[in-house]
Image: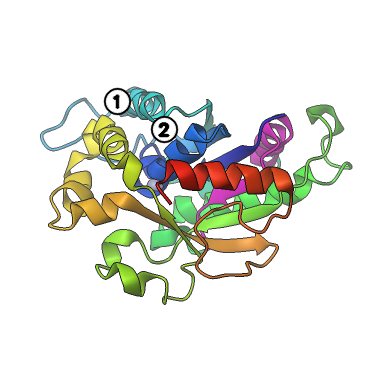
Amino acid sequence: MRNSLLLCFAHPGDESFFAAGTICQYRAAGFDVVLCCGTRGERGTPGNPALCTIEDLAVTREQELRDACAILGVTALEILPYQDQQLSQAPPADIRLSLVRLIRRYRPEVVITFDPNGGNGHPDHIAISRFASDAVVAAADERYMRDTGAPWTVARMAWVCPVAPWQETNRAALGKHPGVDFILNVENWRETKAQALLAHRTQSENIQRLFLQRSNADMVLGIETFRLGWGLPLKRLPADDLFQDLGTNYFVARRKRVRKLAGG
Ligand SMILES: [Zn+2]
């Protein structure tokens, strides 16, 4: 069985904003990377000027997400059928079943989601963080949903960091912020991250502002940050690998390969 990483986000684009380089890095090292997106982002912006009607936005943004996933090499994309800006209203037992099924099927060692404050406070981000946490615990307990497969215990949950790379222009100072527990050097995948971001054509204004038109665009595209949610504590902070200290030779070998690919 291959190592795997599961990302649980709320909207098309979240994966490219917060974790595109991370996805590329672990895919290049042979990991399976599965993305679960809770909505199709149908209440977001259709772009300026608009690239589609509001009625077509769900279909358009789903296609943008699929294009970004193809660029990033995502192993599997799972889109849940919940409503944009109302993800918190998803029936808990319903979304738990969907997420437990995914966790037991793909058996990820590490799950990435938003932190309990949703990263930027977005209610959908807070909701997916809550639902993912609920599902990770349920997936490990055989009493839940026996027909969805054998229980699976996730080793670590990582949260999108409370300090994004575009919020701290001094790279050396980044690791001194509380909550910046992982700093991943994804410089080798800057171009791919930019391409994945640009695949979200309706979101172009934000992407240009936060990433591509910045004077330090190379820096903000070249690092990604995460916070340790729960799981074994890290021996060294900030860490440079989401699988650091998980304690098996298998992980150590994989880590060496990831570092080599990252030029470390
Ligand atoms: Zn979002």
Label 2, secondary structure: give it. loop
Of residue 111 and residue 125, the one placed in the foreground of this image is 111
- The residue at 56%/46% (across/down) is 256
Asked if residue 233 is positioned above or below residue 8 in the image, the reply reads below
Q: Which residues are magenta?
A: 94-116
Which amino acid type is marked by label 1?
A: Glu
Which amino acid type is marked by label 2?
A: Arg
The furthest residue to the right: 143
Q: Residues within 10 Å of mark 2 (few under 14, many from 20)?
A: many
In the shown orientation, is residue 192 left or right of residue 237? left
Q: Which mark is residue 21?
A: none
On the image, the x and y values in percent for residue 171 come to: 30, 67
Asked if residue 124 is positioned above or below residue 24 in the image, the reply reads below
Q: Name the image quarter holding the N terminus.
A: top right
- The residue at 54%/41% (across/down) is 257
In the shown orientation, is residue 172 left or right of residue 22? left
Q: Quadrant of residue 8?
A: top right
In the shown orientation, is residue 188 left or right of residue 51? right
Question: What coloring was used for the rendering?
Answer: rainbow
- Residue 103 can be seen in this image: yes
Tag 1 near tag 2, CB within 8 Å: no
Asked if residue 194 is positioned above or below residue 122 in the image, the reply reads above
- The residue that label 1 is drawn on is 55
- The residue at 48%/29% (across/down) is 74
On the image, the x and y values in percent for residue 255 come to: 58, 47
Q: Quadrant of residue 169?
A: bottom left
Of the two numbered discs 1 and 2 in the rendering, the one whose residue sits closer to the viewer: 2
Q: Does the magenta run of residues contain 105?
A: yes
Q: Residues within 10 Å of mark 1 (few under 14, many from 20)?
A: few
Label 1, secondary structure: give it. loop
- The residue that label 2 is drawn on is 40
